[in-house]
């Protein structure tokens, strides 16, 4: 008998060591940028805000550039691990130079029960969410309505819609659970395939929930992405 585990769903989780120093400064800068973009758009203050996706061009702080460089390193490491069974062995041993191309980077803020409904990201192979600011875990989870789910990111398995998230027996136990909840933590980066459905559940707290999100594609620098008869 031969058993193949097809189409796995990798999720990379990383922690930024410089978050304690960098996050407060970056948060202040992003909130100032939010005020500028709201004024330019003629938008009133609301509980939810999503910036334009040109954050790489707008924010030129050294602290932000250092964060972006770290994001690139994390994505390279995650992509390499996720493709362990798909790439040639020489690539896994450092024989391939990976080029990360961001197709968009933006920030979002939420408060007073604001949320981001279920969605996926297109025109990219990987997406990421980096948490800059949120209430500490004890305060966040103590919310009288949202509790442990306050401001979490929920990922839905690719099979979720097909099964309606319902049917469970011993035969499909390998598909459980149909969704995964990840708590927001300042300095935490989540990397996931862009096709993976996800949502940010309602958040309310003393601090606003502030995140940076991005879409990216990964290519072989100076060479072809062609592999197994398919081109990237």
Image: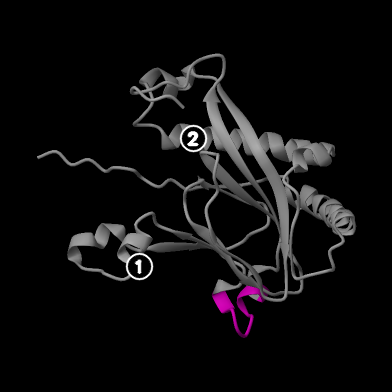
| Earlier-in-chain disc, 2 versus 1 | 2
Quadrant where the image shows the N terminus: top left
Residue 231 position in % (x across, y down): 43, 24
Q: Residue furthest bottom?
A: 144
When the figure is inspected, residue 174 is found, relative to residue 168, above or below; the finding is above
Mark whose residue sits in front, 2 or 1: 1
Helix, strand, or loop for circle 1?
loop
Splitting the image into 4 quarters, where does residue 184 fall? Answer: bottom right
Q: Residue furthest front?
A: 42
Please tell me which residue is depicted at 34% across the width and 31% down the height of the picture: 85
Q: Give the distance between the C-alpha atoms of the residues marked 2 and 1, in whole angstroms.
A: 28 Å
Left or right, 198 with respect to 160, comes to right
Q: Are marks 2 and 1 in contact (CB under 8 Å)?
A: no
Q: Give the structural element (helix, strand or loop) at label 2.
A: helix
Is residue 140 rendered magenta in the image?
Answer: yes
Side of 105 relative to 174 (left or right)? right
The answer to which image quadrant residue 103 occupies is: top right
Q: Report the span colored magenta.
A: 139-148
Mark 2, residue position: 79
Q: Residue at x 87, y 61 (%)?
A: 42
**Which of the pair 172/121 is nearer the observer?**
121
Mark 2 neighbour class, 10 Å CA radius: few under 14, some 14 to 19, many 20 or more: many
State the image coordinates of residue 130 (x, y, percent, origin top left).
65, 50
Is residue 25 magenta-colored? no
Left or right for 93, reference 148 = left
Q: Residue 89: give x, y in percent of width and height.
A: 37, 21
Q: Residue at x 51, y 14 (%)?
A: 223
Q: Residues within 10 Å of mark 1 (few under 14, many from 20)?
A: some
Residue picked out by circle 1: 165
Location of residue 88 in the rendering, given as x and y in whole percent from the top left corner = 37, 21
């Amino acid at each position: 008998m031969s058993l193949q585990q097809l189409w796995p769903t990798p999720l990379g989780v990383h922690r930024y060591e410089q978050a304690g120093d960098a996050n407060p400064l970056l948060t202040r800068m992003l909130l100032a940028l939010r005020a500028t973009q709201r004024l330019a758009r003629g938008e009133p203050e609301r509980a939810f805000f999503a910036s334009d996706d040109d954050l790489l061009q707008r924010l030129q702080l050294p602290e932000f550039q250092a964060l972006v460089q770290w994001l690139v390193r994390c994505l390279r490491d995650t992509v390499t691990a996720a493709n362990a069974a798909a790439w040639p062995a020489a690539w896994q041993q450092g024989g391939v130079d990976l080029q990360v191309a961001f197709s968009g980077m933006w920030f979002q803020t939420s408060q007073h029960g604001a949320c981001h409904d279920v969605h996926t990201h297109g025109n990219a192979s990987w997406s990421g969410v980096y948490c800059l600011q949120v209430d500490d875990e004890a305060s966040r989870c103590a919310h009288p309505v949202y509790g442990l789910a306050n401001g979490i990111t929920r990922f839905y398995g690719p099979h979720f819609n097909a099964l309606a998230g319902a049917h469970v027996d011993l035969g499909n136990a390998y598909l459980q659970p149909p969704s995964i909840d990840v708590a927001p933590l300042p300095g935490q980066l989540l990397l996931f395939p862009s096709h993976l459905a996800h949502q940010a559940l309602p958040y309310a707290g003393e601090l606003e929930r502030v995140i940076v999100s991005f879409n990216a594609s990964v290519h072989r620098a100076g060479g072809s992405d062609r592999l197994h008869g398919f081109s990237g």
